[in-house]
Image: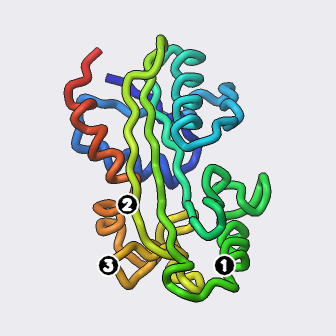
Amino acid sequence: MQILIACTNFHKIREIKDLLKSLPHIELITLHQFPHYNQPEETGASFKENAVLKAEHAAKTLNVWALADDSGLIVPILKGAPGIYSARYAGLHASEKENCDKLLQEMSTYRSSQERVAYYECCIAIAAPLGIKKIVEGTCAGSIAIESRGGRGFGYDPLFIKNDYEKTFGELDDAVKKRVSHRSRAFERLVPFLENLRE
């Protein structure tokens, strides 16, 4: 069965493919195979709304089954920022480093561990051309490091320290991150649905 990953982020596509490699009956394709497709604007007020919007739009427009992920970092003391704006926190075309630098600047006056609490959230939606079929969510709790550490991962990984770990996601082995991340927890809830999915 063929499912489109409704995404063009190389890091995210690679991670999703790795998380689903145990399902040989699922063939994953990407938006790179549909160069003329225009992704919808992310107008949702939550990760769930944006994941549903992206999955439904791709499935209906391209007449395929589509999987969309919307995820980001939430820092309570910053009133939930970066939140749904995680990918464009420092501006519409900001780089990952610019986003991280802005977050470090915003957090510079907060020094206690309680003030630096944060968590990643991920929502995944799967849609057929006629509508949504499954929605799952996953979270990963931790805190924001004082400075950027490590070159692994992507996004805010060099700043995020998972609870009970001394290293940032940017320092952790890929295998460890894969086991404990917000995205992996969401996919754990999705796999049973996909295992039983047949055209």
Disc with the residue nearer the chain's start (3 vs 1): 1
Q: Position of residue 86 (x, y in %)?
A: 63, 57
Q: CA distance from mark 3 to mark 1?
A: 21 Å
Number of other residues with Cα within 10 Å of mark 1, as a class: few under 14, some 14 to 19, many 20 or more: some
Q: Give the number of the disc on residue 181.
A: 2
For the N terminus, the quadrant is: top left
Location of residue 62 in the rendering, given as x and y in whole percent from the top left corner? 56, 18
7 horizontally vs 195: left or right: right
User: Callout 3: helix, strand or loop?
Assistant: loop
Circle 1 is placed at which residue position? 107
Q: Amino acid at mark 2?
A: Ser
Q: Residue at x 64, y 36 (%)?
A: 44
Distance between the Cα atoms at labels 1 and 2?
Answer: 22 Å
Question: Label 1 amino acid?
Answer: Met
The secondary structure type at the circle numbered 1 is loop
- Reply above or below: 163 against 179: below
Q: Camera-side residue: 36 or 91?
A: 91
* Left or right of residue 132: residue 115: right
Residue 164: image tag: 3
Residue at figure coordinates x 46%, y 49% from the top left? 122
| Above or below, 167 relative to 39 | below
Q: Earlier in the sequence, mark 1 or mark 2?
A: 1
Residues marked 1 and 2 touching at CB (< 8 Å): no
